Image (spheres, helix red, strand yellow):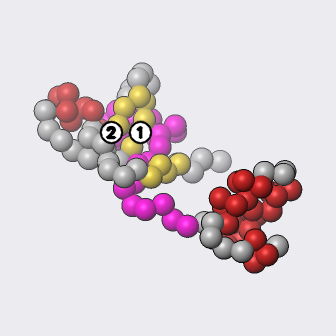
Amino acid sequence: MPRTMRTRHVTKLPDCILCQMRQNVSVPARFDSTINGGSWGFLCDGHMAAAGNMAIACRLSDEPEPEPCLKERRSEIMEAISSGDFDLAEDLIGDGDISEWL
């Protein structure tokens, strides 16, 4: 089964390393991948298609990270409470009341 590509949310997209090296231009990178199976680098769409490895790449996004759905959040909170990690549970709950999640 093909794996779902992970997405890393960043505040600003880095520049494509190959566009910088080969053409001395700044092009936003949308991927973090190995380059032709060697070292890792940030790649634009074109260089990802030409030299990247989709099997292990990570997509970069400058969009805000989406809020987890309530079911996922409740599961994370209950897991933290069950494991005794009350600091994590408080972080996940934020300013809300813990009784709303129990």
Question: Which residue is depicted at the point 21% across and 35% down?
Answer: 19
Q: Give x and y (percent) for residue 67.
A: 55, 67
Q: Is residue 40 above or below residue 79?
A: above
- At x 80% / y 62%, what residue is drawn? 78
The magenta stretch spans residue 62? yes
Classify mark 1: helix, strand or loop.
strand
Residue type of the residue flagged with mark 2: Leu
Q: Of the residues shown, which amino acid type is indicated by label 1?
A: Asp
Q: According to the image, label 2 marks what residue? A: 43
| Residue neighbourhood size for the residue with mark 1, other residues' Cα within 10 Å, grouped as few (<14), some (14–19), many (≥20) | many
Residue 7: where, in percent of width, then height?
Answer: 49, 51
Q: What residue is rendered at 66% in x and 61% in y? A: 92
Q: Position of residue 2 (x, y in %)?
A: 60, 47
Q: Which residues are magenta?
A: 48-67
Q: Position of residue 5 (x, y in %)?
A: 52, 48
Q: Quadrant of residue 64?
A: bottom left
